[in-house]
Image: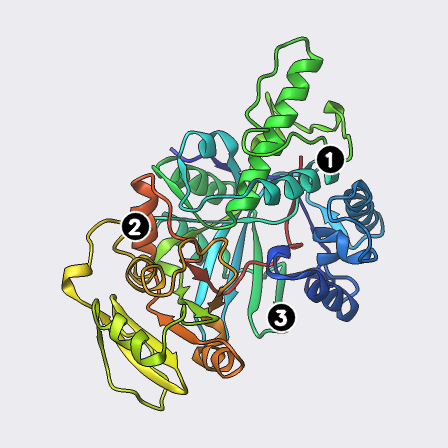
Amino acid sequence: MADVIPFSCIRPCEDRASDVASLPYDVFSLDEAKDEIARHPRSFLRIDMAEATFADSVEKHDERIYARARTLLDEAIADGTYVVDGEPHYYLYRLQAVDGRSQTGVVGCSSIDDYLNDVIKKHEKTRADKEVDRIRHVDTCGAQTGPIFLAFRSDGTIERVIEKTASAEPLYDFEADDGVRHTVWRVDDPADADAIRAAFEATPALYIADGHHRAASAVKAGLLRRERVAAASGGRGESSAANGSDRNDGGKQGFADAVPCGDSLESDHFLSVVFPSDQLTILDYNRAVADLNGLSSGEFLDRIRERFEVGEAAPMPCKPDCKGSFGMYLDGAWYSLEIKDAYRSSDPVAGLDVALLQDNLLGPVLGIEDPRTDKRIDFIGGIRGLEELKRRVDGGMAVAFALYPTSIEELFAVADAGLLMPPKSTWFEPKLRSGLFIHRI
């Protein structure tokens, strides 16, 4: 049973939504964030990535950064940029890509206990250093500002509510700079809200599609607040919030900042958008490598042929059209690769195309043993197209590989097995915007 509840939302007033909506902080470098804020001074990125409002000399985890994020958020609420919907509601959030693809999810708050008890399933390992930053941001701001992208297998109930609610006038409807259209409705009918709640209660599992670090950080920030409240009431608050990351009280917000929600705390749930899985699109996540590991091009091709069928060199881009097939750009030419049957696998992880490439080529031939840490490999989201692979190699890298996208069912299979995907296995597009929904904790 999944616990996804309505919440009292802090959201932009109707005429400011397009100004504040921002891509997630983790898709920007610091320089890119500074440029984005210069172009869009109201962008929520200045709150989500407040270090971009400081000089480069200020250390990334300086306490002043988190304090400024809270100040900027409080000022945006005070000046009317944001309004507070006092009563708890669900919201519907539709993203329509430039090519017409559309996905509509329910905005609500998911249980941190569901995360801890594996009702919310994960497929990616998180890094402690990245968690610390978001724990401090959430805790100091007293708010969750970036929704976690979840998916589930729907029985059609949610879609019926979506169809009904989406016939009404939306709260927001705007096109972002990248051409993606964002539309938001509030679910005002209590019967529809009850149907959504019941549908999730009948759902055995939710899956993190994107936002593992944000989810882990929201959970650990919630556990810290439980611990503080327990300590203040004389109990022995025990928390796993510091497991895997340093314990940190951010801007030293006290337990009194913890917002009650009935018999629990608002921080017992985290901001999420939950999408029916059949609406989602995963794009390819491609690779480029800086050198051939000391091999000549001929030697490299000979090594590849040990485990792959290699097509003839061609001038046109080679886009994989099925599992187990790959495109490769080398020395100004494209090659098709197909893994030989003897090296395929039925294992949920080893059978993924990203794993087949890693285990049969990147590792044994190119010496990329740990793609998480090896500086010789770059990862390129499929949204950039195959031309970006050509550009990287023509610009100095040695070889690039185009992959067939991981499917949502493959993601579910890995998560259901309690396993982890290789790094950079999925690229979801379009990206959720931050700043449209804020959950005060």
- Mark earlier in primary sequence (3, 1): 3
Q: How many marks?
A: 3
Identity, as a three-letter code, of the amino acid under mark 2: Val
Please give the residue where the numbered disc 1 appears in the rendered image: 250
- Circle 3 packing at 10 Å, graded few (<14), some (14-19), many (20+), is some
Quick one: SS at disc 3? loop
> Quarter of the image holding residue 201?
top left
Identity, as a three-letter code, of the amino acid under mark 1: Gly
Is residue 405 visible in the rendered image? The answer is yes
The quadrant of the picture occupied by the C terminus is: top right
The quadrant of the picture occupied by the N terminus is: top left
**Vertical placement of 375 versus 299: above or below?**
above
Q: Residue at x 61, y 24 (%)?
A: 262
Please give the residue where the numbered disc 3 appears in the rendered image: 176
**Vertical placement of 402 versus 104: above or below?**
below
Q: Residue at x 63, y 32 (%)?
A: 246
Please give the residue where the numbered disc 2 appears in the rendered image: 349
Q: CA distance from mark 3 to mark 2?
A: 36 Å
